[in-house]
Amino acid sequence: MCEHVIAFCAGGLNHAFMARILLIAACFALTACAQAPKQVDAPEMVAPSSDQLRPKVRPAGLGRVVPKEARTLEEFDVTTAQEREEAAAVPVATVEKRLGLTVASLGDPTQAGFWIKTPLVSAAGKGRVVYPGTGKSVQVYMTPIEGSGSAGSRLSLAAFRLIEAPLTELPEVEVFSGG
């Protein structure tokens, strides 16, 4: 009996008991990790109805697709000579409002057409951009973007080329609404 007391006091019995408890606790912990997450049903697809709202028709040039293999300016600029001529024409009998100066960066070159995305307007519409460096102007479709009036704007590749603004710089341009 004295041997059992010594073994108990030395931790022999305690050690085996604790090892079993830890093994059982580890098994419970591992089974909790193996539970699969609940599956969420995907939303049901509904066919659009005929009276459902559709995207607005965009101005000429914006719906064109730039070829994936485009590498040069000419390949990215898919506007026609007639569109460039019309965009370069200064409106004669129109009322324009000067919105201000903005720093123009090159917009997405895969978006064709003559456009500017600027915080100077609150609603989409027609306008004109003038580059004071050359004095040339281009008629553009203006799209509002968030930002303060002093924030920069994004100008299309076709518009950059028409006003002969340097593509590798951030030119300051004048923006007019109307036209």
Image: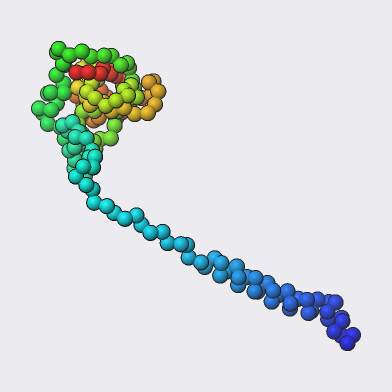
Tell me where residue 29 appears, x and y as whole percent. Answer: 60, 67
- For image coordinates 21% across by 28% down, the residue present is 114
Residue 90 on image: x %, y %: 16, 16
Q: Nearer the viewer, residue 15 or 71?
A: 15
Relative to 7, is 155 on the left or the right? left
Residue at the (48%, 65%) spot, across then down: 36
Location of residue 86 with respect to 132 vertically, above or below: below
Q: How many marks?
A: 0
Can residue 177 be seen in this snapshot?
yes
Which residue occupies the foreground of this view, 39 or 2?
39
Q: Is residue 1 above or below residue 72?
A: below
Q: Is residue 137 left or right of residue 35?
A: left
Q: Quadrant of the N terminus?
A: bottom right
Question: Which of the pair 168/147 is nearer the observer?
Answer: 147
On screen, residue 96 versus residue 27, left or right, reads left
Residue drawn at (34%, 24%), measured in percent from left and top?
Answer: 119
Image coords of residue 69 (percent x, y) = 20, 44
Quarter of the C terminus within the rendering: top left
Give the image quarter of residue 112.
top left
Residue at the right extreme of this rendering: 2
- Name of the residue lying farthest toward the left: 82
* Left-right relation of 54 to 149: left
